[in-house]
């Protein structure tokens, strides 16, 4: 088994609204997977479904080789889970909370728990209800790590924490990964943190996976181009990027016209700058395309290839996906 | 030493770490026999994926900058002076290219940059 998490066509409705619309997600074993998406895109719903807390309306979920929710229990013993919100009893002390938690996990490692308690400077007799937000965050991570999990599932683990605590939390996660080779699944909208530690990225929007790929490809393949004199057919305009999608094939966006559609990379967005200069955001870019650009689009010059960081790429991919969604629902797809 | 490691830079993190260490060796900041931090320690310190650090160390091992001794750790090798000179030159070239690219973006020509560099050097000498 090579995938720690495998979700296919997952659909979940809250009332008449769709929270997840046919979500596909694959987390390879041993990866550190960053699950990115804006607030309200369905990250927490996905994680709750994964942990067996929300039965899917459609689709399948496999967690460490076990089908969820029917067969989730044996998988959960091997998963360390840090939920989005504090889920602990405020009247228990830190030590009591650790003992209580240990009772549910046969793999609980008391020595590791004590080591982390010292590393996080948590007092054993402190009441959970009196902990600061940062201390509570550390305690939740401690509980997840002392289980010695094969898979660590973290829902916004650093959200709302101050920079010092955030560093401690991330260091502890990295240290655990280095020592254990565990798989980590981190949801967050804090893109820069993900950029440091993740080697896979899944980008969620409106209950769908917009893009899922190794971080290195994500970083290498999404670029901003400055193009002069591109003679694209009228109407291609903003929607030239219709071809974006997690899967291949959608590439030749119908509204894009012949020139753009036949390019070996995908244009996510086009904006007019000054004069005949345009700014393109592209996906699937390779360095050798720079030299071949004039041949690909006769009459045009490629003036600059600019690298994008994860946050820029994130924003561009999202807006392209949303533009595509509107085109489809409006039925304006055919040019 | 790694305060300039920037996850937002287009250069992959492993290449930044390898590059930084290579320059440290070339400039004499690290000497033959010095121990590098363990993969786990450096990853945790920098809060980056341990695989990224391991990849950087592998690259440095392949080009002869460091050697990995089983069970003992990773140590700086004895790098020939000529190699160090080339590594320093490569780093200087990289810095200049960065500056040229920034100039292009802002519409400042290479000869203007060159003049400014020259002036700045004169001022430092005084």
Image (cartoon, rainbow, N blue to C red):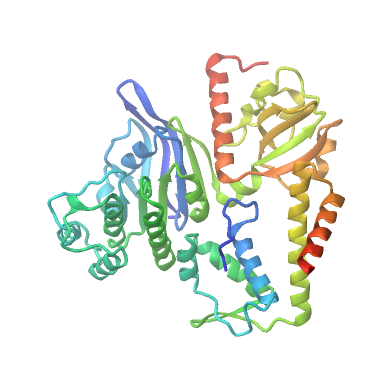
Q: Is residue B17 visible?
A: yes
Q: Is residue A65 visible?
A: no
The C terminus of chain A: image quadrant: top right
The N terminus of chain A: image quadrant: bottom left
Specify the quadrant of the image occupied by residue B85.
bottom right
Task: Give the image location of residue A114, x and y in percent.
Answer: 25, 68
Relative height, residue A246 to residue B10 (above, below): above
Disc count in the image? 0
Relative height, residue A141 to residue A19 (above, below): below
Task: Give the image location of residue A102, x and y in percent.
Answer: 19, 60
Q: Is residue A155 left or right of residue A70?
A: right
Give the farthest residue toward the left.
A91
Specify the quadrant of the image occupied by residue B121.
bottom right
Specify the quadrant of the image occupied by residue A276.
top right
Question: In the depicted view, which residue is nearer to us: A276 or A183?
Answer: A276
Q: Is residue A35 left or right of residue A95?
A: right
Q: Residue at x 39, y 57 (%)?
A: A164
Question: In the depicted view, which residue is nearer to us: A202 or A162?
Answer: A162
Q: Is residue A36 left or right of residue A235?
A: left
Task: Give the image location of residue A231, x and y in percent.
Answer: 81, 25
Q: Residue at x 19, y 59 (%)?
A: A94
Task: Give the image location of residue A109, x and y in percent.
Answer: 25, 67
Q: Is residue A164 left or right of residue B43?
A: left
Question: In the depicted view, which residue is nearer to us: A139 or A179?
Answer: A139
Relative height, residue A107 to residue A129 (above, below): below
Question: In the depicted view, which residue is nearer to us: A9 or A138?
Answer: A138
């Amino acid at each position: 088994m090579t995938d720690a998490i495998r979700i296919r066509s997952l659909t979940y409705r809250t009332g008449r609204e769709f929270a997840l619309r046919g979500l596909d997600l694959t987390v390879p074993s041993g990866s550190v997977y960053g699950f990115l998406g804006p607030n309200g895109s369905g990250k927490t719903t996905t994680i709750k479904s994964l942990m067996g807390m929300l039965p899917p309306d459609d689709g399948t979920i496999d967690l460490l080789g076990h089908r969820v929710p029917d067969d989730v229990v044996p998988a959960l013993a091997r998963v360390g889970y840090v939920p989005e919100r504090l889920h602990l009893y405020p009247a228990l002390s830190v030590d009591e909370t650790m003992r209580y938690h240990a009772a549910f996990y046969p793999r609980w490692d008391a020595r590791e728990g004590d080591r982390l308690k010292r590393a996080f400077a948590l007092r054993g007799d402190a009441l959970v209800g009196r902990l600061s937000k940062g201390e509570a965050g550390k305690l939740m991570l401690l509980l997840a790590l002392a289980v010695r999990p094969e898979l660590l599932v973290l829902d916004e683990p650093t959200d709302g924490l101050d920079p010092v605590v955030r560093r401690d939390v991330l260091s502890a996660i990295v240290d655990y990964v280095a020592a254990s080779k565990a798989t980590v699944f981190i949801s967050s909208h804090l893109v820069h943190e993900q950029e440091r530690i993740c080697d896979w990225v899944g980008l969620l929007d409106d209950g769908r996976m917009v893009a899922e790929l190794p971080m290195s490809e994500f970083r290498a393949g999404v670029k901003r181009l400055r193009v002069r004199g591109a003679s694209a057919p009228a109407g291609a305009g903003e929607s030239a990027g219709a071809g974006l999608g997690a899967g291949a094939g959608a590439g030749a966006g119908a509204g894009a016209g012949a020139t753009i559609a036949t390019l070996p990379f995908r244009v996510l967005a086009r904006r007019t700058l000054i004069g005949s200069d345009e700014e393109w955001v592209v996906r699937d870019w390779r360095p050798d395309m720079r030299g071949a650009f004039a041949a690909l689009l006769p009459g045009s010059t490629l003036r600059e290839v600019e690298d994008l960081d994860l946050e820029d790429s994130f924003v561009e991919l999202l807006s392209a996906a949303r533009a595509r969604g509107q085109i489809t629902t409006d039925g304006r797809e055919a040019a | 030493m790694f305060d300039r490691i920037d996850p937002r830079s287009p250069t992959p993190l492993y290449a930044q770490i390898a590059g930084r260490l290579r320059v440290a060796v070339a400039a004499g900041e690290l000497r033959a026999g010095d121990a590098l931090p363990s993969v786990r320690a450096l990853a945790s310190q920098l809060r980056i994926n341990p695989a990224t650090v391991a990849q950087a160390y592998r690259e440095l091992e392949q080009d002869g900058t460091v050697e990995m001794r089983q069970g003992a750790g990773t140590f700086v090798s004895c790098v020939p002076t000529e190699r160090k000179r080339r590594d320093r030159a490569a780093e200087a070239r990289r810095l200049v290219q960065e500056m040229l690219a920034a100039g292009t973006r802002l519409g400042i020509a290479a000869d203007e940059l060159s003049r400014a560099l020259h002036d700045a050097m004169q001022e430092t000498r005084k």
